[in-house]
């Protein structure tokens, strides 16, 4: 199971996401850096644990009030081996191709940003479309996006994130009801990533048993709920569970 630390970017800073209410997000305070500069936080994270993937949520891009392409370019330059997943609200072919050109390994398309199913169909015809990730965005049990896309799992890509925005930073644990609903609806095995609510090692082990291919981690890391030893144990547990 892949472990993806998450950096939520707003106004060129890393912020602490909670409950999906972006207007209330504040600069991140964490044990990994004295400041909320993205490069400093990443340096602290990678010194603490050798993550190979990193998830960036460009909140300014998602909210349509700017972007963090220069920050993304700096991260690629400083950490060329780090595989970046980026959700910046990109839904046009041009915007997705810009992310690939920056060196982003996996552009993430959030359903909350998709205007309709036809837009997604155009993206699926792009070169390197097999590296697109679809984030199925939910808040308080309600799907955010095209009902048509939600109802047609045959149009979903190989990798899908089940994003429970209301669970983020709340210490409530994963949204198991939603995860099971998506797993039952999905037409192929694997490729599901959980996002929102993970608190502790037990949650990670349960996700391994459930069959998650990966998990997005933020508050559990930054609050100190998960230790580096916990992540090592999770990796070992994943290996033994295969």
Image (tube, rainbow, N blue to C red):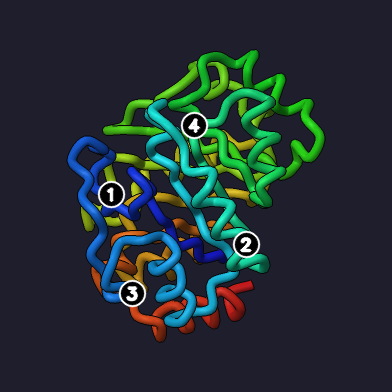
In what element is the residue under mark 4?
loop
User: Around disc 1, counting alpha carbons within 10 Å, would you say few (fewer than 14), some (14 to 19), or many (20 or more)?
Assistant: many
Is the C-beta separation of discs 1 and 2 under 8 Å? no
The quarter in which the C terminus is drawn is: bottom right
Residue 219: percent from the left, percent from the top? 29, 61
Q: Which mark is residue 32?
A: 3
User: Around disc 2, counting alpha carbons within 10 Å, would you say few (fewer than 14), some (14 to 19), or many (20 or more)?
Assistant: few
CA separation in Å, label 1 and label 2? 26 Å
- Residue at the (34%, 80%) spot, across then down: 227
Q: Earlier in the sequence, mark 3 or mark 4?
A: 3
* Residue on which the image places disc 2: 77
Judge depth for marks 2 and 3 and give the one in front.
2
Residue 67: percent from the left, percent from the top? 46, 37
* Residue on which the image places disc 1: 17
Residue 144: percent from the left, percent from the top? 40, 25
Q: Earlier in the sequence, mark 3 or mark 1?
A: 1
- Give the quadrant of residue 158: top right
In what element is the residue under mark 2?
helix
CA separation in Å, label 3 and label 4? 27 Å
Q: Earlier in the sequence, mark 1 or mark 2?
A: 1
Left or right, 101 with reference to 117: right
Residue 35: percent from the left, percent from the top? 28, 66
Camera-nearest residue between 224 and 89: 89
User: Around disc 3, counting alpha carbons within 10 Å, would you say few (fewer than 14), some (14 to 19), or many (20 or more)?
Assistant: some
CA separation in Å, label 2 and label 3? 20 Å
Q: Earlier in the sequence, mark 2 or mark 3?
A: 3
Judge whether 92 appears above or below 166 on screen. Answer: above
Res. 150 in view: yes
CA separation in Å, label 2 and label 4? 22 Å
Q: Earlier in the sequence, mark 1 or mark 4?
A: 1
* Residue on which the image places disc 4: 89
In what element is the residue under mark 1?
loop
């Amino acid at each position: 199971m892949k472990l993806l630390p998450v950096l939520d970017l707003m106004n060129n800073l890393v912020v602490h996401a909670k409950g999906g209410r972006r207007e209330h997000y504040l600069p991140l305070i964490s044990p990994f850096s004295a400041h909320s500069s993205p490069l400093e936080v990443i340096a602290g994270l990678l010194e603490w644990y050798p993550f190979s993937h990193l998830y960036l949520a460009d909140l300014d891009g998602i909210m349509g009030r700017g972007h963090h392409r220069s920050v993304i370019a700096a991260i690629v330059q400083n950490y060329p081996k780090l595989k970046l997943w980026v959700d910046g609200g990109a839904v046009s072919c041009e915007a997705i191709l810009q992310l690939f050109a920056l060196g982003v390994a996996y552009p993430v398309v959030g359903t909350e940003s998709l205007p309709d199913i036809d837009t997604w169909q155009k993206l699926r015809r792009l070169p390197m479309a097999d590296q697109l990730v679809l984030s199925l965005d939910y808040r308080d049990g309600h799907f955010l996006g095209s009902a048509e896309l939600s109802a047609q799992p045959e149009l979903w890509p190989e990798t899908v994130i089940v994003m429970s925005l209301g669970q983020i930073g709340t210490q409530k644990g994963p949204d198991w009801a939603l995860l099971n609903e998506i797993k039952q609806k999905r037409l192929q095995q694997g490729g599901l990533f959980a996002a929102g609510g993970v608190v502790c090692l037990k949650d990670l082990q349960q996700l391994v048993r459930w069959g998650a291919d990966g998990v997005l981690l933020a508050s559990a890391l930054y609050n100190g709920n998960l230790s580096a030893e916990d992540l090592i144990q999770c990796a070992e547990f994943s290996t033994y569970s295969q």
